[in-house]
Image (cartoon, helix red, strand yellow):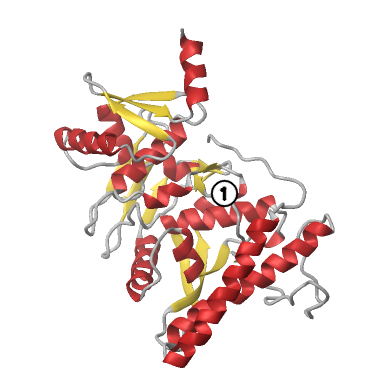
Amino acid sequence: MGGIKKKIDGPVQLSDALTESLVRLGQTVRARNSAKLGGGNTGQAELLLGDAAPIEDQVNALKDRQRAGARPATPTTDNQAKGGLVRIRHPNRDFFLADLFDYALKDDGASMEAPIFTLATKPDLSIWEWKSRDGNKSVRVMPSVLGRATQHDKDVLIYLVSQMTEGLNRGRDDAKNRTVRFTVYDYLVTTNRGVGGDDYRRLQESFDRLAGTRIKTDIRTGGQRVTDNFGILERVRIVEKSLGDERMIAVDVTLSEWLYNAVQAYEVLSIHPDYFRLRKPMARRLYELARKHCGHQAQWKIGLKLLQAKTGSKSNLKEFRRAVRAIEADNSLPEYRLVLNDNDTVTFYTRDAKKLLAGIVGRS
């Protein structure tokens, strides 16, 4: 798989400006929550307050570690707060705590290659089968009665893969666990979603589709070939709810071995944060393919019919051509722009002017 990421050695460096901004954010949120508590909005105040305090504690602890020039400390049996360190909130845990910030977004190479997620916005109950052009890779995707996992549902995986990869880069032993615990509010903010009740409900629906969608594939991840059926997510467990309205506050998600193997082997690629701003599922899928196949090259060219197969689009070629033209016209893909040529080929160009010029000069 492409995009093997190397481990980063040494302490993580944060600018003082970023650190102070995060601290101020925590203070502002707590002050706003105090005001809301007086107005009776208990559920929302509890949700925000629970997320604001740990941010400030984490920032201060990380700054102390940076000044000492050390890696993040390995958890010990001493569970008391000392000096600049907060207490260990989850001693002897068997999950990875997704509590990192200032990290690069990552996507796994396997699901960028194969169209596992549906582009439909309505429930897709059909079985989807895909085979690579050379016949060496195949995927069979089987939805539950709730429908196949969507391209927007994939945001959950991107968030988890990003956090876990960063945890591995920082040398955290707990990043080797398949179960990830995270706060729902942090996920919603990171993926550019709202934080209202409907957003929490939609996330629960995403969990249901991700856990219900099963895959049978012979695509290797982490040097291992998985040939049995497995859910995209093995398990989702709500571990904390708001007392006011029972919204999810914290959840445990257990990744499939297939996805977990890909992350542990660093079979991931960095993606642009504006990916989460793309409204159309097709635009998100086209960006993934451009990032996977264009990579650090100046351009990548592909036939329209083959591109349709790689996106997983079920429309006819005429409708697919129209959809690609619309995305070409709005010119919204991060890092790349696409051109649909008259001969039904599509060329993706990097937006990096220096890289594009170097590529043009190299071909001349």
Q: Is residue 255 left or right of residue 12?
A: left
Which x, y percent locates residue 278? 35, 48
* Above or below, comparing residue 20 to residue 32 in the picture: above
Can residue 217 be seen? yes
Give the camera-side residue of 258 and 159.
159
**Number of marks:** 1
With respect to residue 323, does 121 lie above or below?
A: below
Q: What residue is shown at x 74% (from left), y 75% (from top)?
A: 86
Q: Which residue is mark 1?
A: 104
Residue 223 sits above or below residue 157 on the image: above
SS state under label 1 = loop
Residue 15: where, in percent of width, then height? 68, 53
Callout 1 amino acid: Ala
The answer to whether residue 194 is above or below residue 291 is below
Asked whether 203 or 19 is in front, the reply is 19
Q: How crowded is the residue under tag 1: few (<14 C-alpha within 10 Å), some, or many (20+)?
A: some
**Residue 179 or residue 11, whichever sits in front:** 11
x and y percent of residue 230 in the render? 43, 57
Whether residue 176 can be seen here: no
